[in-house]
Amino acid sequence: MATTDIPDVLPVLHLLPQTPTIALVGNPNAGKTSLFNRLTGLRAQTSNFPGTTVEHRRASALLADQPVTLVDLPGLYTLDAATPDEKIAVDALTGQLKKWPQPDAVLVVVDATNLERNLFLTSQLIELGLPMLVALNMIDVADKHGVHFELDELAERLGCPVVPISARTGQGIDQLTCALQQLVQDQTAPVVPSDLTSCGSCNGCQYSARYDWAETVSAATSRGDDSSYGRRSEAIDRLLTHKVMGMVCFAAIMVLTFMFIFWMAQYPMDLIDGWFGLASQTVSQWLPSGDFRSLLTDGVLGGVGGMLVFLPQICMLFFVLALLEDSGYMARAVFVMDRLMYRVGLPGKAFVPMLSAHACAIPAIMAARVIDDRRDRLATILVLPLMTCSARLPVYAMVMALLFPHDPLKASLLFAGAYVLGIVAALAMAWILKGTLLKGRTKPLVIELPNYRVPSLRNALLLVVDRAWAFVKTAGTTIMMISLVIWALATYPKTAPEDLAPAVQSQLAQLAEQGDTVAAANLLDQRQLENSFAGQIGRGLEPVFAPLGFDWKMSVGIVSSFAAREVIVSTLAVLYGIGEEASAEQGLLVDQLRNSTHADGRPVFTTAASLSLLVFYVLAMQCLPTQVVTRRETGSWKWPLLQLTSMSALAYVAALITFQTARALGFG
């Protein structure tokens, strides 16, 4: 049990470049990040290694009177890196990474319930010659299952101090901080044991020799039988990794997960939306009508609110995924799905981000970090926006209401067809990418199935706070700038009423005489938008989109919806004379769209044009916030540009085929 006087976190200082650096190193699932969170709390900073997209977390702390910088390196099984991310972590540890000095000391986190396996990496770290301390984590779990250690014997065989701890409960943290302080002050490198030295001298058998050494040390320093712990996990795995029941269990868990996310997220999302709506309404009451008020309400508040409304989904997604990961189940889910994903060139780890993309592509792209191989991760990120997200639903609903207003069965079938089209397109594009641009075989899945354990709420909450702040800080500013640009395009240049065509002026005067100020304001808004930069762009793009069955107003909707897909609904409402306030009453908008005609009297929203619009929105990359996050996750603008161009081309060609085929079959 943890003593009551153990502090939750160490005192944390601002980062000091001259302070000694301690790198936390360990196998995945050894509790390394849990220990880092225990030592630093919420004060850690997340950033990339210099010149890379590989993340690490760091914070400055005070060990008694000694300030130090703690760095949480990515998990490693061996210093012989197999992936680019692992290589960067090893380079940072060995001092071979540019603009990144080698750490002054190493804190090795070892899983007490899997000592033998963890000692392989430990043996390599000993040979680096850096001052080193071993934290024997999960000691409480080992004690519970009757496993005990000869700590003095283990320290002697490793040539460095060993401190038993439990990062989850805080047990042994005070002893660990004292040992770390002594390590930093003494700067004593570990003594390489003689039997370990022979491992590097063998020809062709270094791995075998190291494993033999790890087995010998584990047998000599541990007492008890931990097989009951492993037997429990094996019993559960008979169900969760079964070829058939494993899939059923995975489907049930994922359905429950996303039901929880959709159900829980709607309340804070509505609350955030209400707050920004109230703020916009308050500003509108305080300020006189004009561009400045429009800038604040439609540009600033609309942009920030449109970004923050995604935050609850992101937080809840990462919270649930952190719990599943910490419990040990996520490794089983990846194992079960690997068989299916491998057929299209994607790893099993890509399945969870693809599922979460049905809520929103932004958190899904961020969740793709679980994929180790960079090519596999890039392929996954590039196809995730093809999955139907919640932002597409207003567009789908509008098209369903246009096509099947009184036939719910056909409407639901078409709705399901839109989802299936997105999934098929994503898998097909992944298969093409892995055979061309990202050519290469998908890496076979080699994954550790850790023992099941109770997940840490503390770690999950810390991860949520870290990811949420990174999203708000990095993506938020750019998303707001995008919204401001869209606002400017739709607002300028201004058209004075006296500069309108005589027929329009006459119509405005007639409406004013009738006292219909709402209709007059809607007509003026419509003409203003037609003459704005966005309207001019729409007119210029009309010849491009005409083969898809789109008129210039639909082209303006497509341009405006690059900020967010659902923006087309309010844009079409203004263009067709309803006004943005009325767009919520979708029936009015649908009636206007259904009755709209071309100049020659032909209806605009025929069956062919409506199907074309649906296919275009299923496949098009019309979410620039997603592009921003793709840039952040890939570290380059070339990947989001490729994502934009490839999805736009796919959407255009598919919509063209849909419209021309439907029209040839007599559907207008």
Image (cartoon, rainbow, N blue to C red):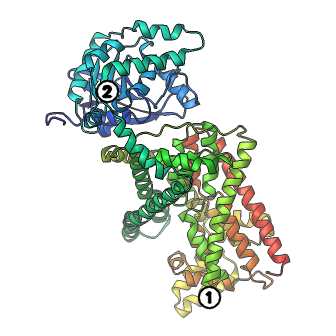
Furthest toward the right, the residue is 664
Q: Which residue is mark 1?
A: 406
> Can you give x and y, in whole percent of width and height, for residue 436 in the image?
76, 42
Quick one: SS at disc 2? strand
> Can you give x and y, in whole percent of width and height, for residue 453 in the image?
35, 44
Which comes sooner in the sequence, label 1 or label 2?
2
The quarter in which the N terminus is drawn is: top left
**Gap in angstroms between the C-alphas marked 1 and 2:** 66 Å
Local packing at callout 2 (Cα closer than 10 Å; few below 14, some 14-19, many 20+) is: many
Residue drawn 52% across and 91% down? 515
Query: Which residue is at the front of the view, 295 or 643?
Result: 643
Q: Is residue 6 left or right of residue 433?
A: left
Residue 27 visible to the viewer: yes
The quarter in which the C terminus is drawn is: bottom right
Local packing at callout 1 (Cα closer than 10 Å; few below 14, some 14-19, many 20+) is: few
Residue 21 visible to the viewer: no
| Residue 484 higher or lower than 71, as above or below | below
Tally of numbered discs:
2
Instruction: Point out the frontmost of discs 1 and 2.
Output: 2
Query: Which residue is at the front of the view, 157 or 419?
Result: 157
Three-letter amino acid code of the residue under disc 1: His
> Can you give x and y, in whole percent of width and height, for residue 156 in the image?
31, 12
Residue drawn 85% across and 76% down? 664
Q: Is residue 512 left or right of residue 151?
A: right
Query: Which residue is at the front of the view, 78 or 656?
Result: 78
* Image-quadrant location for residue 38: top left
> Can you give x and y, in whole percent of width and height, for residue 234 in the image?
43, 44
Quick one: SS at disc 1? loop
Q: Which residue is mark 2?
A: 136
Residue drawn 71% across and 43% down? 434
* Image-quadrant location for residue 652: bottom right
